Structures are given as C-alpha cells and as structure tokens.
Amino acid sequence: MLDKFYKTPQKSAYLLILILAILSTFYNAVFPLHGDEAYYWMWSHDLQLSYFDHPPMIAYLIYFTNFISQSEWGIRLVPVLSMTISSLYLYKLTALISDEKTALNAVLIISTVILTHAGYIFATPDAPLILFWTLSLYYSYKAIFEGKLIHFVLAGLFLGAMMISKYSAIMLVLSILIFIITKRRDLFLNPYLYLSGIIATAVVMPMLYWNYEHDWISFLFQLHHGSSDSYVIQPWLILEFVSSQFGVFSPVFTWVLFYYLIKDRLYFKDDKLYFIALSVVVIVGFFLYKSFYVSMAPSYSGPAYIGGAILLSIIFKKYELKKTFAIGLGIALFLTLLVRVALLTNLPQLQRYMYKSEDVVKRMYSHAKEGDKFYGAHLTTAAYIKYYLPTHPDTDVGIDSRYSYYDMVRDEEEWHKDGLVLCRNIKREALLKKYYENVELIDTYEVLKNRIFYTYRVSNPKKKEKN
C-alpha cells in the first residue's frame, strides 16, 4: 500500500490535498463564525482600498465566495481554497528543488500539522497571506533561478497580492532582497527585476494611497499593536513563543527543522536551499525578537513553515531519517486529530469565541422592538450580530472601545439610537449611561462558565456635546 502511494507521488499528493479540501469544507459548516470572521465578512459588503485593521485582500476574496454561499462554509471557502492552492504549489516547488517523492513528503508534513488545519478553518487575513506567500515564493524562485520574463511578471503580481493580504508579508520581500544582495547581485543589472518591482508596486499602490489619505492610520495601528513601550526583556514571553512553535508545527518537526538549520552549513553552500531557508529564518527571527518584549501569537510565524516543510522533507531524505519522519508524522497527525475531534464534539473551551454565537444573537433578537438599532460592546460582537440577524441590518459598537472600521464609517449624528446592546462577560451600565438616559439590563445568558452575555435596552440618547 505504502509502495503504491510513493510510486505515483504527484497523484498521491494531489489526491491527499483534494480529500483534505473536501473534508474541511464539510467540517467548516458545523461551526458558527468567529467574531473576527464576521467582521471580515462585513468588510466584503463594503469594499474599500484598505481598512483600518488590515489590508483589503481578505474582504476581496470573501466578496467572491459570497456568490457561492454566505453561510459559514461558504465564507470559509477562502481558507480552504487558499490552503489547497498553497499545498499544490508547495509540492511543485519541492519537486523543482529535489524530487517528487520528497515533494510528497513535504505535502504530508504540511497536511498533518495543527497550524495548517487551523488555516483551513478560519477566514482571516492569514489565509490569503499563506496563499500569496507560497505563490510568491514559487515564482520568485523560478524568476531567480530560471530567469524567464513570465516568472518575473508573476512574481511581481503575487508579491503585490501578498502585500495587500497582511503587513507581515514584508518579511518575504526582505528575505528575497537579502538573497539577491548576498548571492545574486547580478540581478540588479537585469531589467526584469525592476519590472517585477513595478508590477508589485502597482498592485500595492491603492492600499498605500488609502493609507496616505488616512494619515497612515493602518500602518501606525499595526506598528503599535505588535509593539511594547517598554524594552524590558520578558523571558516568559520568549518561552511562550518558542514553545508555541513546537505546538503548531508539532514537536518533532520543529526540533528537526531548527536543529539542522543551525547545524547544517549546506544551506549556505546551496543557493536554492539558502533561498528557501531565508524565507523561514527571517520571519521566525523577527517574531522571536518581538517576543522578547510582547506576546506573539503562534500563527504570526505561520508562513515560515511553507519553506519549513520543504527544508524538512529534504532533511529527512538527506540524512535518511525514516523512523524520525514516521514518528514526527504520527505525533503531528495525532495532535491535529485530537484538536479536530475536540472542536467537532463541541468542546466549549476550544470553541469559546464561537460557541453558541448564533443562539446568543437569536436570544437578544427575541427582545427586539420595531425600529430598534443593534449594538455590540465590541467590534466582533457587533459584527456577528449583523451576520446572524435576519436581513443583516447595520450594527455598531455601542460603547467606547478600541478604534476600528466602525469608527471610520459611522455617522456620529446617527451613532446612538434607541435599541439593544449585547455585552460579553462584563456589565456595561456605566459606559452606556454616558450616552443614554435610560439603560436597563433585560437579559443575562450564561453560555459557559466565565462567558456570560448581557442584553441591555437603551433609550433616550443624551444630546451630543459640540466641539
């Protein structure tokens, strides 16, 4: 059976990728939307050149999947298609560098780790980032090592698309520049390189123009969002980030990858492997540095493991680590299935930010009166109220909260009207009384321990003070 699997590696890899896509599509229909997903779905109904929180690509992709379905599984076609295409190009790139059996192993690696399966579920900016990161890596490799015009054109196109997916995409651009400066300075005399740069800039320009028009508000938000005012090193945050990588990419795979990246000088001698290694080291190194001062989410370094899976499959082949590969695959698959089954069996603690979201909104709506305006106490709460309410009415954030898309599009004169406010975990009478004369708690809904929703009826808005 195993011999047959490896006898036709391309067919086996493509079949595995297809099966995972189909299963993920059905799996994704089970869960309510996370508030962040509802927030990006809302963007897809108000397409802009960019947004306060992120670049616009996630909204553009959801806009197109809306034509298929606006249900949960339809919105999550974005991550399913993104991860599927990414896996296909991972296979193609590994086969270019090594051989088809090694490429199949790379697909097996990426298909079994928790990070990838999370990527198949959630419609967030990480999905288009992974998609266009992989396409950019593939066509940049082809451009640099094969030198054809079409590859430079496609590299520029996909690098631009990657940059309007998520700002951390700059890490791949930086790794490619480091490679050219250290290994292929001759490319600076190649006009195709500059054409590629012009195409990428043209794709990014609308997003840059939007930021210019808004005083670079999105760039400044992300700069402060992932930074600390204090430069005091916090060892527990470093440990948290490092240990999280062993979790999301599995313990064996993470250990083998970084052990050989440090130990093996081959990556500095072989230009092709050096090119891939930079795509891993630059982004992981950047977020490792950031973790000295502020907490970093495990997914931030996720794109690194596209190149990581390629290198890892080559490491297993070069050092004939067949037993280690089998053990690593087994552990990764076990951990991933554990999380998948736990989510599927409604383990509330894993689903806590999705759990019963639709029920919560329906319960709030049962108190609605004609003409009511609907508010959330947080941007994600407001977003999934809009998603799950009949006719998807406009919603807003009803109290002072962190700056968001809502602040940029709202008409201040129309902000506070009579209606209902849904709050999560914390009672908000004091903040609501800043805007309303009448604030009444009309419902308390305990979804989980330490996850309680409060519904307020608010009326008689206070007159707004003129500046």
Image: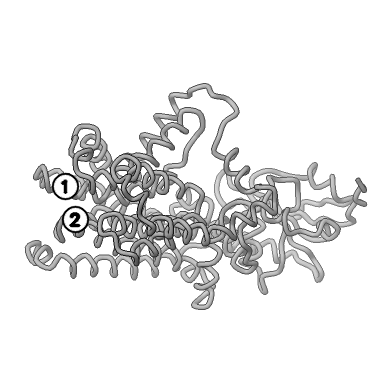
Q: Which mark is residue 37?
A: none
User: Residue at (59%, 67%) from the top-left corner?
Assistant: 44
Compared with residue 324, is residue 234 higher up or lower down, i.e. above or below? above
Q: At which x and y percent is residue 197? A: 45, 56
Q: Residue furthest bottom?
A: 67
Sequence-wise, the earlier of marks 1 and 2 is 2
Q: At which x and y percent is residue 244? A: 38, 39
Q: Residue furthest left?
A: 3
Left or right: where 148 falls relative to 316: right
Q: Is residue 443 visible?
A: no
CB atoms of marks 1 and 2 within 8 Å: yes
Q: Nearer the viewer, mark 1 or mark 2?
A: 2
Q: Amino acid at mark 1?
A: Phe
User: Residue at (42%, 61%) from the top-left corner?
Assistant: 158
Quarter of the picture holding the C terminus: top right
Quarter of the picture holding the N terminus: bottom left
Q: At which x and y percent is residue 228? A: 57, 31
Q: Secondary structure at mark 1?
A: helix
Which residue occupies the foreground of this view, 387 or 109? 109
Q: Amino acid at mark 2?
A: Asn
Q: Secondary structure at mark 2?
A: helix
Which residue occupies the foreground of this view, 65 or 222? 222
Compared with residue 92, is residue 438 higher up or lower down, i.e. above or below? above
Left or right: where 250 falls relative to 53: left
Left or right: where 438 falls relative to 3: right
Q: Which mark is residue 105?
A: 2
Tag 1 residue = 325
